[in-house]
Amino acid sequence: MAINTLQQKFMHELGDIYDAENQFLKGQAEMLQNATDPALQDMITTHIEQTKGQISNLEQVFAALGEQPKREMCDAAKGLVSEAQKTMREAAGVPEILDCVINGSASKVEHYEISSYRGLITGAELMGQQDIVSLLQQNLEQEESTAMLVEQSAPKLIQKAMSAEGKTSAKGSGAQAVPTY
């Protein structure tokens, strides 16, 4: 479909994030199945429930615009999910590394979603669609909160992986083990 108007651009982007959220929901289920760290599992479980609510919010946005929900293939989401699956397979033999991979993949997804929601919110505000801004804002706030949790959990997961490898953080000791992730 050609995109010739701002409304068409907005609907395309709305369909894109709707598709992305649905793809990410399936990807999160796979991440949960592979995660071993209890805190990481809890974070993924919580975000799965949030994602279901975000999909519902997007469906309400479509309805408010008088449209049926329509998924627009999100190639970025497809790539992020594919990359996560590939890297999880490659790290499958070491649970601590696998948890780091899952956490890193989740971070990439969150930042894609944040960028998408920020763009949609700006477009909705400028096009006078105030009725849908709050639904999109709810999704954005959840994504930003999850991104912060993911980023805060990374050092603990990396330290756990380093301990499993027999390495320790050498803060202040002069020698630093640098993890590759």
Image: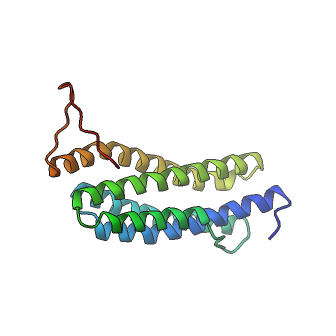
Q: Residue at point 20% right, 36% down?
A: 169
Q: Relative to residue 5, is residue 144 depicted above or below?
A: above
Viewer-side residue, 14 vs 177: 177
* Residue 49 in view here: no
Q: Residue at point 66% right, 52% down?
A: 120
Q: Residue at point 50% right, 48% down?
A: 141
Q: Which image quadrant is residue 168 in?
A: top left
- Which residue sits furthest right? 4
Q: Quadrant of the N terminus?
A: bottom right
Q: Answer with left or right where residue 63 lies relative to residue 143.
A: right
Q: Answer with left or right where residue 2 lies relative to residue 35.
A: right
Residue 38: give x, y in percent of width and height.
22, 58
Q: Relative to residue 153, is residue 86 depicted above or below?
A: below
* Residue 110 in view here: yes
Q: Answer with left or right where residue 160 lies relative to residue 122.
A: left
Q: Relative to residue 112, is residue 73 depicted above or below?
A: below
Residue 21: give x, y in percent of width and height.
53, 65
Residue 137: give x, y in percent of width and height.
57, 50
Residue 48: give x, y in percent of width and height.
40, 65
Q: Which image quadrant is residue 89 in?
A: bottom left
- Which residue sits furthest left? 166
Q: Answer with left or right where residue 176 lies relative to residue 27.
A: left
